[in-house]
Image (cartoon, grey):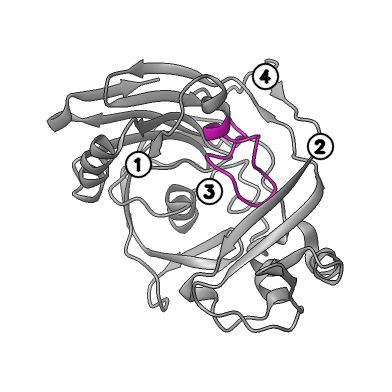
Amino acid sequence: MSLKREKSACPVRVVAPYELTRKIKIKPGDAGKTVLDFFDERFPFAGRTGWLDRINRGWIQEDGKPVSYVDILKENRELHHYSPKVKEPAVASDVHVLDERDDWLAVYKPAPLPMHQGGRYYKNTLLYMLSEMGYVNLKMVHRLDAVTSGVVLFAKHKESAKKLRSAFEAGMVRKVYHAVVEGEMLEPIIVKASIRRKIGFVFECGEGLTGAKPATTKFFPEEIESGKTIVRCEPITGRTHQIRLHLKHAGFPIFDDPIYGPNGDDSGQKLQNSAISLRSSGIEICELGIKVNH
């Protein structure tokens, strides 16, 4: 990663509009919300008025029957969201294999590109694109944000998935990222700040937050120029948006992050539809003989 960002052309993937019905299972944290509040908070891309229109059209159903926007959700309730003409945003398409063994597959994920289906994305996702390349039934053992590029590791079957997930949970995995942040970081920093969901796809960190999960990240400055720093980031835990949140918490936000950056909007209304200066540079699991860098 360089402080002087290259403006080279990036291959783009576009899919034709298509019909789709998605299944959505209600998690414990969303129980008690109305149907409208749930969709507006969880999938803010359509806006509250947009979701109300979809509900009134009968596109949100349960057991084949339309639901009301004031219905109260219960845990494990399964809803079906019908879309007659899905138009997915274009994504980066430069997906390529970095390394492969009988048990696992390491690939480069460009950005912006979601890992899996959800929200506005189904076919324009890493898992779907890998299935088109012949890699079917892959098991995710960790994730990258849609706006983050770099190394991603997949298991090829259930047995290897169990081993890899256990390694991640046990802290046996060394993950290295690089970010370009606003400000001059002069010495290494360790951030310990718990993380929880704030609204939709936006998270927050700090102390004393009810329901927040503990998180720790180590940061090491590598290059400083023109008020910005290239930082090596080593997350000890693996919470959603952890590096982005912890850099902001430390006073060194990723300079082009639309949500947590210097001019970020964490209201949950701003779309994340472009790559940011955060890259997964390497994954190492010594006990399993895995070492992948990019």
Label whose residue precedes the other's in the sequence (4 or 3): 4
Quarter occupied by residue 17: top right
Of the numbered discs in the image, which one, if any, rests on residue 189?
none
| Discs 1/3, front | 1
Q: Where residue 17 is drawn, which disc sits there?
A: 2
Label 1 or label 3, whichever comes before in sequence order: 1
For the residues labelled 1 and 4, the Cα–Cα distance comes to 27 Å
Q: Amino acid at mark 2?
A: Pro
Of the two numbered discs 3 and 2 on the same chain, state the one appearing first in sequence: 2
Frontmost of labels 1 and 4 is 1
| Residue under label 4 | 10
Please give the residue where the numbered disc 1 appears in the rendered image.
141
Residue 242: image location, x then y, percent: 43, 52
Q: Picture coordinates of residue 87 (x, y %)? A: 80, 41
x then y, percent, for residue 198: 55, 68
Read off the residue under disc 3: 253
Image: magenta residue range = 111-128
